[in-house]
Amino acid sequence: MTYQETLDWMFAQLPMYQREGKTAFKKDLTNTIALANHLGNPENKFKSIHVGGTNGKGSTSHMLASILQEAGYKVGLYTSPHLKNFTERIRINGEEISREAVVDFITENKSFLEQQKLSFFEMTVGLAFNEFEKQKVDIAIIEVGLGGRLDSTNIITPEVAVITNIGLDHTQFLGETLPEIAFEKAGIIKKDVPVVIGEKQEETTEVFEKKAREYNAKLVFASDDQNIYKTDLLGDYQINNTRTAVNAIKELTGFKVTEEHIKKGLLNVVKNTNLKGRWQVLQEFPKIICDTAHNKEGLQYALKQLEKEKYKVLHIVLGVVSDKNLDEVLPLFPVKATYYFCKPDIPRGLNEEELAEKAKEYELNGEIFNSVNSAYNKLIMNLKEGDVAYIGGSTFVVAEIL
């Protein structure tokens, strides 16, 4: 199979959560464990840091990788979803996995993958762990896909577990309340493994304390650290993520990481890891910003940041996925803006007319476009000197314009 045929085959294997939604959610780890056994348990052959949480886990994972790269280590990085290319999900020292490695893995294991009916996400986790073992990484930063307890990544025993924060996202799988969601995320806490919680939240602290006691895990709240760490990632919301990353590094034993490595790592995240889509400025004059924030908590931070921008007219290209609670996110958006409502090009993208109709209830008005690209092209035509544009609402909207 060619690389494209391999990808098409992978995407076709059982509905993929990112694209399809609820039907792709798996309720246990049986498949992942079976694949890991079939591959000779690569997850036991490299050290790791496991990163979960509702928001900021991607940025935090990239910061951790960057710091450890600055310290001279060979660092694996597994994240999801990808923005443009599937290979972004698996990197070593910032380099994406080769297309050949993807094709070889699927070709070699295809009959097992078919027979076991593995989902897209499960086989991708297997591919990542296999690659990290093969390339003999010193450590891998593993970002949780969804939740924690039942996530395919949760077969590792990391050196440190990290949970950035808890917000109401993916409630149809993880629970309707913050403590319920915290319980799922706390599923990555392992016996005697230190755990760093990014933000101390009244509703969830007890859940983490109980789980940490049960597993004899040292519990650290990064938000108790009031230091400000500089990073090249723009957006005030990165303050929490830098604290989380630094405190996770401090709990990591057996690796030599100096203050200088931490400083340089945080200042060179984009250069070291190629992270995109986090308060990314696509052009300066007139300014166009894109951000992958897509739930209430994430958008609160991003839109607060947007308030600090100075402009004549604010333009917002907005698209969302269909399982988003619009009554939670739409009130966060500014009324004084020109909107370009669009549908991300995935099965679970919300129809642009439906979005515009709902937005009207919150006095958000603008034009309707049947694709992100047509919305973006119209934005470019309309942008005048002194204006500012924001593109977001979903990772998939940002992916289409990058």
Image: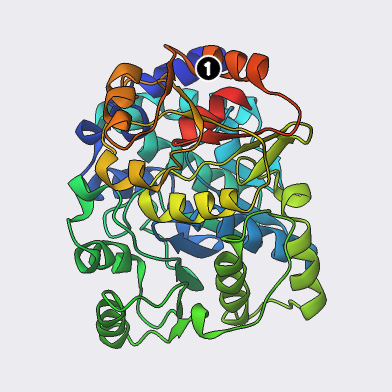
List x then y, in percent, for residue 103: 55, 23
Choose top left, top right, bottom left or bottom right for residue 330: top left
Task: Work out whether residue 192 or residue 234 is closer to the camera in this orientation and state it.
Answer: 234
Kind of residue indicated by mark 1: Ala
Relative height, residue 226 to residue 382 (above, below) = below
Mark 1 highlights which residue? 375
Task: Work out whether residue 112 or residue 146 is closer to the camera in this orientation and state it.
Answer: 146
List x then y, in percent, for residue 375: 52, 17
List x then y, in percent, for residue 343: 40, 20
Q: Which residue is rendered at x = 40% and y = 56% of the image? A: 297
Relative height, residue 222 to residue 371 (above, below) = below
Q: Residues within 10 Å of mark 1 (few under 14, many from 20)?
A: many
List x then y, in percent, for residue 366: 44, 22
Choose top left, top right, bottom left or bottom right for residue 164: bottom left
Q: Which residue is rendered at x = 36% and y = 58% of the image? A: 155
Task: Work out whether residue 6 or residue 334 is closer to the camera in this orientation and state it.
Answer: 334
Q: Which residue is rendered at x = 40% and y = 26% of the image? A: 365
Relative height, residue 71 to residue 259 (above, below) = above
